[in-house]
Image (tube, rainbow, N blue to C red):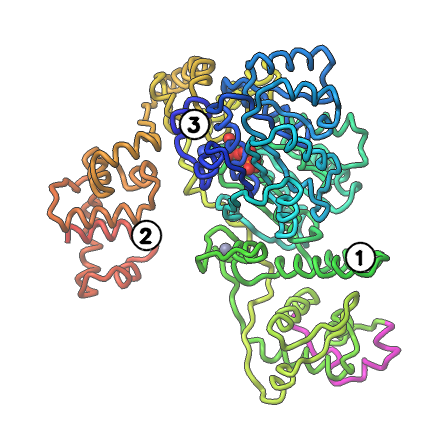
Amino acid sequence: MLKLLKTHFGFDQFRPLQEEIIREVMAGRDALVLMPTGGGKSLCFQLPALLLPGLTLVISPLISLMKDQVDALRANGVAAACINSTLSRGEIVKIQTEAQQGKIKILYAAPERLILPEFQHFLQKIKVSLLAIDESHCISEWGHDFRPDYLNLKILRDLFPGVPVLALTATATPQVREDIREQLALEQAKLFISSFNRHNLFYTVLPQREAYGQLLEILGEHRQEAAIIYCFSRKDTENLAADLRGEGFKALPYHAGLESEERRTNQESFIRDEVQIITATIAFGMGIDKPDVRLVIHYHLPKSLEGYYQETGRAGRDGLPSKCILFYSSADAVKQQYFIKQIEEATERKNAYRKLEQMVAYAELTHCRRQHLLAYFGEDYPREKCDGCDICLSPPQEFEATIVSQKIMSAIVRTGERFGMNHVIEVLLGSKNKNILERDHHRLSVYGIVDDFSKEDLRRIINQLVSRNLIDKRGEAYPVLALSQEGQDFLRTRQKICLPRPIAPAKLSPAREAVDREYDRELFEKLRVLRKQIADAQGVPPFVVFGDLSLRQMAAYLPQSEKSFARISGVGQEKLNKYGKVFTEVISTYAGEKNLPEKGVPLTGTEKSRRLKREGSTYQETKRLVLEKMSLEEMAGVRNLTARTILAHIEKLAAAGEEIDLAYLRPGAERFAKIKAAFQQAGGLALSPVKEMLGEDFSFEEIRIARLFI
Ligand code: ADP
Ligand code: ZN
């Protein structure tokens, strides 16, 4: 299986659960797979398809996706085809004949095909080994994307008794999950759920106040990279796209109100890297599978956290670091409340409020956003901090909030616990609003007593007090604020309280570029151009030729021989044959001009693990790299471990008296002397006091290495 994975897909290792799922399917058993977008679901049927004797039939709802997947498979040398309404009769007949002759391994079809007698007749004449149902939540009326055509799938069970069914989806609440089981007769199927944590996505929330300026700054930093910007309305998408074009960006809008032809061409331009930015309503995204979207920006507040997770999920499918940015102001929430109020049906309206509240809670979080998102899907995030969200990277500072909290709560009491947040805030800020004057609220002792916080600040503070159960929000549309029992006690006993400072949330911090090995940007650009030329000549999207990860690795290691090129992730046998020469030529020319050496492409996962087994232990592997005189970072990269772990190995090896020469890692004389002096002053071998003394200029790693010599 690992061999096929490399030759046909160019990958060295399975992603979590892929191998287990494939084994289940190969054993002829049904399976139900829940994996987030980008988790690697397709491989779970594409790889078995290569091993199974007959054909793998894939049901997929979106014709555009089908075509991309087939293109990608063919580029990898897999005999794949699709049958859908965009093909002529002649083309369909040709594909069907090939399928009957066993020349096709993977056949994609849309669900509406299944009821056509002609298609059923065709199916009866072919040997099917596996049925894969992509986006299988579409079968459930409980889900968000019900497609009646999916009910036709029941026919497949009758047509192919005993053939294993693999149902896959990225969205399934327990209810939808049960529905899938029932509708597809999958009661016995084993359920595979992978973590919904998208470790390469960086989550951040920025204040809406300076949204446009910040947006320009962010886009400027990501000039050649694909971005989706979600907006509230169709009009917003068009205006924003026009504004961005005015600033020199390539941007196009996408929404359900556009002519289908325009929608298609805009989407196509994005997929083919001709346009970097799409401004869209939520209508965009279902039909695209672009793996290298680096930014998903919500310019306005989304309607639900679930939707937000799905939309952000379209970033970084290829596993490279990507950013998810939400612009937020509480005014945005108020605007949405206004629209929700128009919903006539009571339960629907209530649901919409609840979802909005959850979204607001996310935007105003003061703890890890990743943890919160995962908790929303019922998953425990095992760590306190994630290092991949704005809050973990720059935790909000606390401030002594006793006085302002007392003022707020007094204002709630004095106005009779009968008013909403806006009114209470206006009283506190001393507004001359008609509502206030009419009710004589300008005569209250709490009128105008806050002058050190803005309206927005007060909103955040009140929401904090609500989340700490000191204030209750009562009622749905315009909830009234009242004190809870705890709130009353708080005031009476004059308790103290600290709250996170309601300043503008942290500025956008860079995504963890650590995973993103340093690569030569200039060469990357050249390779990108080459990729685009090849893709255009073949009429496929650029990522079908090579993904960004492959290009980055090429630009990092400069492989110039066939052998080293083959080690790049994403380079399988077919692509090696087809593109190896042109790419290594460009790399060689560049390397020659700049006089840059080829760096050893790290051993692939399979080779690496074989080697590890052969040589015994993980320490020995590190030892081998030390003997090759690799730097800490290189070792960490090659071994896919942190520098800290590598250091721990080295310390163990040294302690065990292994003969390794570490001199090359030793800091320079001057720095070493400084570190040594600090250890002497601290009077021990503990790291922290020494690090404190030495400051930012010295890293923990450097100090730890020096300690070995001391
Ligand atoms: P999903 O259908 O779950 O959204 P895909 O099947 O489209 O995800 O896979 C997402 C990306 O991950 C694709 O670019 C795919 O080539 C890549 N991928 C899948 N499996 C692996 C693997 N084992 N190693 C590296 N990349 C993988
Ligand atoms: Zn976090």
* Drawn side of residue 116 relative to residue 641, left or right: right
Compute the Cα span from label 3 to label 2. Answer: 44 Å
The structure residue drawn at horizontal position 73% and vertical position 72%, both measured from the top left corner, is: 425
Residue sitting nearer the eye, 12 or 562 = 12
Residue 340's disc is: 1
Amino acid type at mark 2: Asp
> Where is the N terminus found, in terms of image quarters?
top left
Q: Is residue 486 visible?
A: yes
User: Is 610 situated above or below 582?
Assistant: below
Residue sitting nearer the eye, 372 or 7 = 7
- Asked if ligand 1 lies within 8 A of label 3, the reply is yes
Q: Mark 2 points at which residue?
A: 697
The structure residue drawn at horizontal position 79% and vertical position 67%, both measured from the top left corner, is: 478
Magenta stretch prevailing secondary structure: loop
* Drawn side of residue 277 relative to residue 32, left or right: right
First in residue order: circle 3 vs circle 2: 3
